[in-house]
Amino acid sequence: MIAPEPHALPDLVRELHRQAAPWLPAGQATRLRWGPPVQPGVGQERPTVVSTARLNRILEHAAGDFTVTVEAGLPLQHLQEALMEQRQWLALDWPWGSGADGEGAGTLGGLVARGMAGGLRQRHLGVRDQLIGIGLLRTDGTAARAGGRVVKNVAGYDLMRLLTGSWGSLALITELTLRTVPLPPQRRGLLLQGEPQQLEPLRRRLLAAALGPELLDWWSAPLAETAGQPPLPGLLLGLASVSGEAIADQLAAIGSEADAAGVRRLELDSERLEALRAVALGPDQGCGPADGPRTGRWLLRLGVLPAEAAALLADPLLAGLRLSLAAGSGLGLAWAEATQLPTYRVEALRRRCRVLGGQLTVLEQPAAAGLPAWEDAPSRPLIEAVKRQFDPLQQLARGRLPGVHTPSGLSR
């Protein structure tokens, strides 16, 4: 892995372009094994990884405008700590595998490149909606920029959304401008447990409420059990407000409905709520090279239509899987050890997600499994056309183009 000084980065990218050498953009390299394996170039034993780890500064925090501009290699944990001094935060979940304090969360550039969001998107939307400016290096070393450093900015092409979720396949992200929000002074939570058909009416009511929750996640029964709760599916709610009385009124109203529906409820103070959210982050991720050995576990990203999430939770295919699924979007993560989940069940679960209007992406899998990380998207021709415009020599993240299934041994 190469981690050049900021002033040397453009020259390095230009030299790689001159050689037509394949390479992989990275931050701290904490999640390079997620998704399809990256194919090395001819004569290479492993892919060349170019890290932005030394691009790690906060360039500007306009606290009064609630925006912050950072270099892409800045760790998410360091940004949150700095924003907290001004009673602000970036309203995003820690990525899976971060640890309770976010130490393994990785960099801002990596977060944008993966484009994933957790339960907090219920109120705050995802990372692409909080991104208002971006700087990047194209594969030929040309620097480009889109958006700006103010919220009301419509200048240029919307490269922010295009680069979000691109998995390093289009360009190297170098700089980001993001929205911040005030830290809520009051937070409480509630865990509701019962059968999915009992919880579904409560989910619909909470999503339609004028004052909805900040967080609303489905939990599978095994995940609730690992958190020290009885093995029943659940809904984890997070409530945030400037008023403790307002939260108490919300909890009382939701509790009455829960009692009427016959579901179990557990009120949570802010510390207990954060402890349960940490359980849904899974085990610590751990770092490794892009071509390192596959882990002995499954990590799956599931998506279904939100109205079909209860049907997914009730499906026997989820037996033994720890699953946290955002109740408003129908997107979430599931994980299990290799011995707990045979490959045929993952294939069946992928088919089931399709029936329920969604998809399944394999982020991590045992070495012998050999499943495609993702299947072809209906928009594959458009995705490939964009790739050709941004990366005509097909240098970046060979074999890892979202929405395009590339058989092993081929690069695209």
Image (spheres, helix red, strand yellow):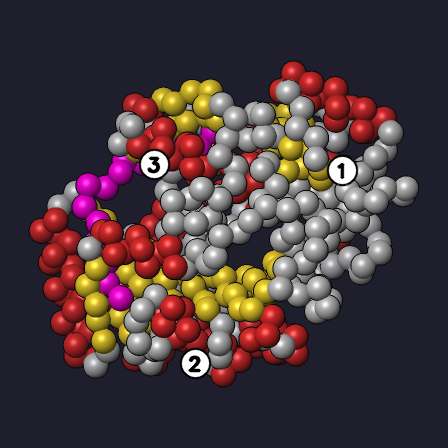
Q: Residues within 10 Å of mark 3 (few under 14, many from 20)?
A: many
Locate residue 219 relative to residue 190 in the image: left or right. Answer: right
Residue on which disc 3 sits: 89
Residue 11 drawn above or below residue 130: above
Question: Quick one: 86 or 320, which is closer to the camera?
Answer: 320
Residue 25 lies in quadrant: top right
Q: Position of residue 294 (x, y in %)?
A: 67, 58
Locate residue 168 relative to residue 276 in the image: left or right. Answer: right
Q: Mark 3 or mark 1, which has the lower sequence index?
A: 1
Q: Secondary structure at mark 1?
A: strand
- Region rendered in magenta: 175-191
Name the outermost residue toward the right: 43
Q: Amino acid at mark 2?
A: Ala
Residue on which disc 2 sits: 314
Q: Is residue 184 magenta?
A: yes
Q: Mark 1 or mark 2, which has the lower sequence index?
A: 1
Quadrant where the N terminus is found in the figure: top right
Q: Amino acid at mark 3?
A: Trp
Instruction: Say the numbered circle drawn on residue 177.
Output: none
Name the outermost residue toward the top: 7
Which one is in front in this view, the residue at disc 1 or the one at disc 2?
A: 1
Residue on which disc 1 sits: 48
Residue 339 drawn above or below residue 398: below
Q: Amino acid at mark 1?
A: Thr
Q: How many marks?
A: 3
Question: Quick one: 128 or 409, which is closer to the camera?
Answer: 409
Which one is in front in this view, the residue at disc 3 or the one at disc 1?
A: 1
The residue shown at (49%, 72%) is 321
Report if the CB atoms under discs 1 and 2 are less than 8 Å apart: no
The residue shown at (28%, 60%) is 237
Q: CA distance from mark 3 to mark 1?
A: 34 Å
Q: Residues within 10 Å of mark 1 (few under 14, many from 20)?
A: many
